[in-house]
Structure formats: structure tokens, C-alpha cells
Amino acid sequence: MAHADGSGDGVRHFTRLDDFTPQQIEDLLDLARRLKHKPARPDLAGRSVGMLFFRPSLRTRSSFEAAMNQLGGRTIALAAASDFWDLEVREGRVMDGKAPEHIRDAAAVLSSYVSALAVRPPVEGQSWEVDRQDAHIRAWARYAKVPVINMESALWHPLQGLADLMTLREHVGSLRGKRLTLAWVHSPQPASAAVAHSLLFAAALAGMHIRVAHPAGYELDEGVLTDVRRVAGTTGAELEQQEELESAVEGAHVVYARSWQSLGDYDNATLSASRRARFKDWRIDERLMARGDDARLMHAMPIRRNVEVTDEVLDGPRSLVHLQAENRLHSAKALLTMLLRH
Ligand code: CP
């Protein structure tokens, strides 16, 4: 699918959920469900996916590798820290700095070796205004001649959004009008907001009633919230935000716990740490979960036990967390099949 910025050149990418139409997302989820219950034919024999990691991963890397193996294909996984080097993303630079190669060249070359490129791009962490542009993953999509899959940029984590929708469908049933609370939780090392953004987009697509609860200063990206409200306007979804955790989980069918960094303090580690330290009691425990409507717990992982969520909830019958992680495999198989089969 060609992108608004002219990238893609007719190649279908998956860099954010709205690279696919709502019907294509439905088709992906159907295929993922079928592949989960019936082993796939190894349709992708002879195909390879190049995986580039500029940041570490446990689930995304291993689920993709397992998915390609099960589909009869191969992966070539490279980590920037050990296997290659910084890549320049800016146009027209005199490249006399740290990066010895431009994404334009790397993408052209790798496109001649593999059938798709999956990238977990770097996040500079200096300015949210800069990082939210997702320049790195957009450059891969612009220059690659094969499909590009976003394995979590600063703004979006569409693979997680897909697995989350699959898990919600399996365990909550029809999602229209169901109440999902996205609860910010404390962590000494908060994650990026990408999972939260893709979850909101996915839940809006499904017509859910969404509450986002976070302390003051942890507002999500305004551009993403505008996109989510636009989708909600077409599906009947609702989006509320509040700064109080207990009331936000009242009547929830699903509590989705996630820690994310304050976008307001993004460039100031000291301010960010002192703000975070004031909210150590933002943790999910059984008392809180009991306020929901037979509420289920979701979390994208990695998860800090007894900091973000207590052992009792995480290991108890409400938790979908490991099933959700398993669905990364099935949804990855569906995506790879759709992108690479023909
Ligand atoms: N949820 C997720 O993307 O996990 P990893 O960072 O381990 O890939």
C-alpha cells in the first residue's frame, strides 16, 4: 500500500495498523484464528525475512522466528549493537559523522536478498517532537522494495495491537461497547507509549468503550488521540481520560496495564524520574481488579512483578498475559502469510 508521504511505491507495508483497512485487519484476525487451531501448510518455503533490531526484544524476535520456521521460511536477524552499524536517515547529508551507511542504500541492498524487512528502529529519546515523526521506519518503508514491518517504533507497535485484538476477541467475545481500561502503572524504567497508542487504535476500531487512566503529566500523544477519536467516530467507540485509577477500573471488562514515559518530560531524565516516584502506588492488585466486571488483565510484557502488577493477579485466573504473548506467534504467522504468500 502506498503511503501518504509517497513511500512504498505499491508495496504493502505494515508500519501502523491503518496501513491496512479495517476489513484487511478483520481478515488477518480470521486467518490468525484459523492458523492457531490448525497447523499451517508451509506456504513460505524459500522465503526469508530480514529482521533488524536497533533495540532488544524477547517476544517480537522469537515469535517472528518461530512463525517463519513454522511457515517453512527463514529469518536473518541482525542486531545493530553487534552485527552492523548506525544508519543515516536524513536526506542530503554529508555523511562524515557516526553513520557509515544510509538507510536508502541498506534498504535497496537488503530488498534484493529477502522477501520482507522487519525493523525495530532506534529511539533517540531526546525530543518527543522528533521521535514521534517515526522517521526511521518511514525511511525503510520509502526505500525498501519489499514489505516493511514495524516491530515497534516510538509511536506505534502494530504487531502488539494485532495480537491484543486477537486476545480480546478470544476472551471477551464481541467487543462493541465492551469496557476497556488502559491503566498507566508505575515502573522504574517505563516503556515507550507505542503499545498504548496501538492498543487505543485497535480498541477504537473494535468499537470499545475506552478509559485511559494516568497521573497528570502522562497524557498520550495528541496526534494519536486525534486519530483514535476519528476512528471512534466511525465505529461508535468512546474514549475517556481520567487521572484516578480506582474509578477508571469500575465496571471494566478488561484492565490493560502499561507503564509509559511522560511525553512532557521526555527530554529531562531528572524531572521524569522525580515525577514517576510520586506515583508508585499506581499498581494493579486484586482489590483493584475486583472493581471491574469479572475483569481480565492484559499486559504486553515485559512486566515487573509486584511493581506493575501483583503476583496474585498475574498468576491468577484473571490474567490473559501469557495467552496474549502466545498470540504474537499466531498473528505474526497470519501477517507473514498475507504479505508474502503471493
Ligand atoms: N511486547 C513486546 O514487543 O515484547 P518484546 O519487547 O520482548 O519484543
Image: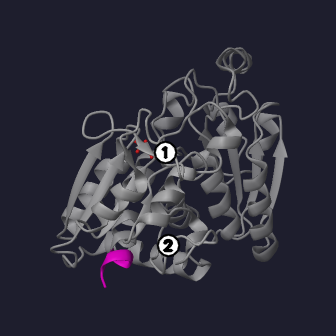
Q: Secondary structure at mark 1?
A: loop
- Name the disc covering residue 317, or none: 1
Task: Name the spot of residue 108 as percent of width and height, x first.
Answer: 34, 64
Task: Name the spot of residue 69 as percent of width and height, x first.
Answer: 19, 62
Residue 144 is left or right of residue 18, and the answer is left
Are there few (<14), some (14-19), or many (20+) residues within 10 Å of tag 1?
A: few
Are there few (<14), some (14-19), or many (20+) residues within 10 Å of tag 2?
A: many
Residue 340 visible, this angle: yes
Specify the segment rendered in magenta.
337-342
Q: Quadrant of residue 226?
A: bottom right
Marks 2 and 1: CB-CB under 8 Å?
no
Task: Report the amino acid beneath label 2.
Answer: Gly
Q: Earlier in the sequence, mark 2 or mark 1?
A: 2
**The quarter of the picture showing ligand 1:** top left
Task: Name the spot of residue 54 as percent of width and height, x first.
Answer: 40, 41
Task: Report the amino acid beneath label 1.
Answer: Pro
Residue that mark 2 sits on:
8
Which residue corresponds to the image point at 57% horizontal and 82% vertical from the top-left?
Answer: 23
Which residue corresponds to the image point at 55% horizontal and 63% vertical from the top-left?
Answer: 165
Query: Residues under labels 2 and 1: Cα distance?
Result: 44 Å
Task: Name the spot of residue 34 as percent of width and height, x first.
Answer: 36, 77
- Mark 1 CB near ligand 1 (8 Å cut): no
The answer to whether residue 21 is above or below residue 328 is below
Which residue corresponds to the image point at 79% horizontal and 49% vertical from the top-left?
Answer: 222
The answer to which of 261 and 238 lies nearer the viewer is: 261
Main SS of residues in magenta? helix
Q: Quadrant of residue 278?
A: top right
